[in-house]
Amino acid sequence: MTGTEIDITEHLIRDLLCEQCPDLADRPVELGARGWDNQVWRLGDDLAVRLPWATASADGLLRKEYAWLPGLAPRLPLRIPVPQRLGEPSERFRRPWLVTTWVPGEPADRAPATRGADAAVALAGFLTALHHPAPNEAPSGRDRGGRLADTARHFQRDLTWAAGLGLVRDPDAVRAVWEDAAAAPEWAGPPLWLHGDLHPANVLTANGTLCGVIDFGDLFAGDPAYDLAAAWILLPDDAVELFHAAYRPRPDAATLRRARGWAVLRALTGIRIGDAGVHGRPGGKATWGPPAQAALRRLTATVSR
């Protein structure tokens, strides 16, 4: 983690708008959220300003969104933050920043989906629309989306830690899911567009179902199993099979096995971040723990003994 050189405040944002987007400078400004990479400030009723604040990589992620999201957004059935303006580094703020559309809704870690059938169909429709072959120049996945077997050390570290604290009830069942997934055949199709970071804080809900998806900084091209893992993390009990039936083309057995393995990794990360939040450690978010625990319960429910 690396902080910005100056505090991000309403006054700073208004100064930046006056310098580079003066037609927007008189709109009301208020803090929306502080994420891993960016702060999001609401700008009037329909726009937002995203500024990097915590990680050195955030600058490139914002530029990636500005380059690719306007072309992807029209075909997506859920609302996403579409970049409108790119703010360039200046004396006042030495990093790029974005003006995007504002997406209403509550993050799913705070307001989980409760209408399982509707949420399953909404998630399937979104990923069906997104998962199309990407061009050769599409971005790669940074530290994600490679061979699942290559995550063995990461998986073992997180499982050992969580089991040692009693945060995983049946570590053998968790290991069985991951090992089966790591042994599945690899993706043989073309690299598809992927969101790359579908955790509950990046998916918005309203009236019990999904209404929006945010933070496309990890957008990349690869194996759809990486995104399909989100079904176990985001959907209520008994909705995952409906999601698989609604997604097109219906995923084959090997893809579902890999997706389960990625879901296990995502759940263990959520448990770690949730525990940090409960104990007040930096970077912790207590709301991440419950959906991660529910995901592990779903994933291990059918493990044969």
Image (cartoon, grey):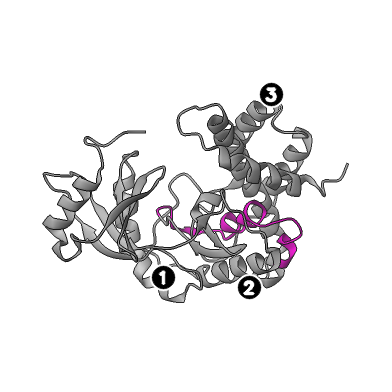
- Looking at the rendered image, the quarter that the C terminus falls into is top right
Alpha-carbon span between mark 1 and mark 2: 18 Å
Query: Badge 3 is on which residue?
Result: 164
Density class for disc 1 (Cα within 10 Å; few <14, some 14-19, many ≥20) is: few
| Camera-side mark, 2 or 3 | 3
| Residue on which disc 2 sits | 248
Image quadrant containing the N terminus: top left
Say which label, 1 or 2, has the lower sequence index: 1
Where 266 falls versus 132 (above or below)?
above
Which span is picked out in magenta?
217-242
Comparing 62 with 186, the one in front is 62
Of the two numbered discs 1 and 3 on the same chain, state the one appearing first in sequence.
Answer: 1
Report if residue 239 lies within the magenta region: yes
Residue 286 at x, y percent in the picture: 56, 37
Residue drawn at point x = 21 percent, y = 36 percent: 6
Q: Amino acid at mark 1?
A: Leu
Q: Which residue is mark 1?
A: 72
Residue 87 horizontal/vertical position (percent) = 20, 56
Is there a contact, CB below 8 Å, between mark 2 and mark 3? no
Callout 2: helix, strand or loop?
Answer: loop
Q: Residues within 10 Å of mark 3 (few under 14, many from 20)?
A: few
Residue 302 is a magenta residue: no
